Image: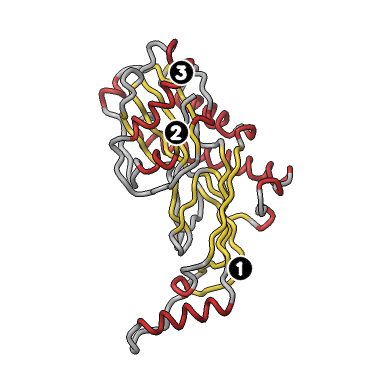
Amino acid sequence: MKKLMAGALLLLLGACGTGVSSDFKATTKKIAILSFAGHQFNALQNIQPGTEAVNRQIDALNGTLPIWTEQPGLDKVYAGSQEIRWKHNISDWGIDAFAVTTATALLAPKYQIIPFKYDPTDLTEDGIYIYHSSTNKIASSVADIIRAQPSFSTAANIDAFVVLVPGARQVTSFDRNSYGIGITKDFMAYHDFSVTFEDVNMLHAFYYVVVLDGHSLEQIAWERAVDDVLYQKRFKGNPALFVHAAYWAPSFDAITSSQREMIIADVQGMIRETLPETLHKLGLMR
């Protein structure tokens, strides 16, 4: 099947969504629900530079700042810190199936849900992710995946596709992107205007919900999962949570069965708690 790059998909998403029209909500519709949001785990770790590299950065910053200015903030001092990323397919974790089941339960009272067989791994995570951009071409990216499914040729009378896709957020004081399902590990945290040095682990479940016309596959509406930003682009609630160090693993192969269970439970919880409001913002729920 045709594989598409999520980088191209996220390039088409911006910071604000749009809801369905009043005409769409006026009558009972037949909809199919798909999720590509939970098939890959993405990890990001910010590495604290050594003393020598930090001192070089301080000297460089002081050399460019007027003498009367304050000392450079730590976010600037550590701006060049190394980032390490790894990713792995987690289709067997069942997160996409959980998302579809959850959305079905929420929308079934209002819509007729039509089963649609598809492969969630057809949306790959390769490529460059760009968070802020235009939204008016998103339909072409998701639509190509839907057309590539064998079940599309036999799908009939579907008024709309409701599709969850991986989202992106710029997180931490370094404005680095985190994607989809995953965890970010950072060495620097801000608390009540004082700076402490400690490992900070943030588990996230970033996603967008896209609504496509069931016949033309043109975009009807889209919305990003609701979030609750606390400070320095970290999150005090869904769809990202502070978690203790026991969640972190240096590689996918190092994730233990107990870590996997904790991650799945928390990700499912974030989807369960954010999806109703996200669908409401789309106008799909009363």
Q: Position of residue 24 (x, y in %)?
A: 30, 23
- The answer to which quarter of the image holds residue 67 is bottom left
Judged from the image, the secondary structure of the residue bearing numbered disc 2 is: strand
- The answer to which quarter of the image holds residue 202 is bottom right
Residue 107 shows which numbered tag?
none
* Kind of residue at badge 3: Ile
* Residue identifier under label 3: 113
* Residue projecting furthest to the right: 257
The answer to which of 189 and 253 lies nearer the viewer is 253
* Kind of residue at badge 2: Leu
Left or right: 154 in relation to 66: right
Distance, label 1 to label 2, CA atoms, is 38 Å
The first of marks 1 and 2 along the sequence is 2
Say which of marks 2 and 3 sits in front: 2
> Does the CB distance between marks 2 and 3 fall below 8 Å?
no
Colour scheme used in the picture?
Answer: secondary structure
Residue in the image at 58% along x and 43% along y: 41
The answer to which of 58 and 22 lies nearer the viewer is 58
* Residue identifier under label 1: 198
Residue in the image at 46% along x and 18% along y: 113
Say which of marks 1 and 2 sits in front: 2
Left or right: 113 in relation to 51: left
Picture layout, residue 149 above or below residue 208: above
Judged from the image, the secondary structure of the residue bearing numbered disc 1 is: strand
Q: Residues within 10 Å of mark 3 (few under 14, many from 20)?
A: many
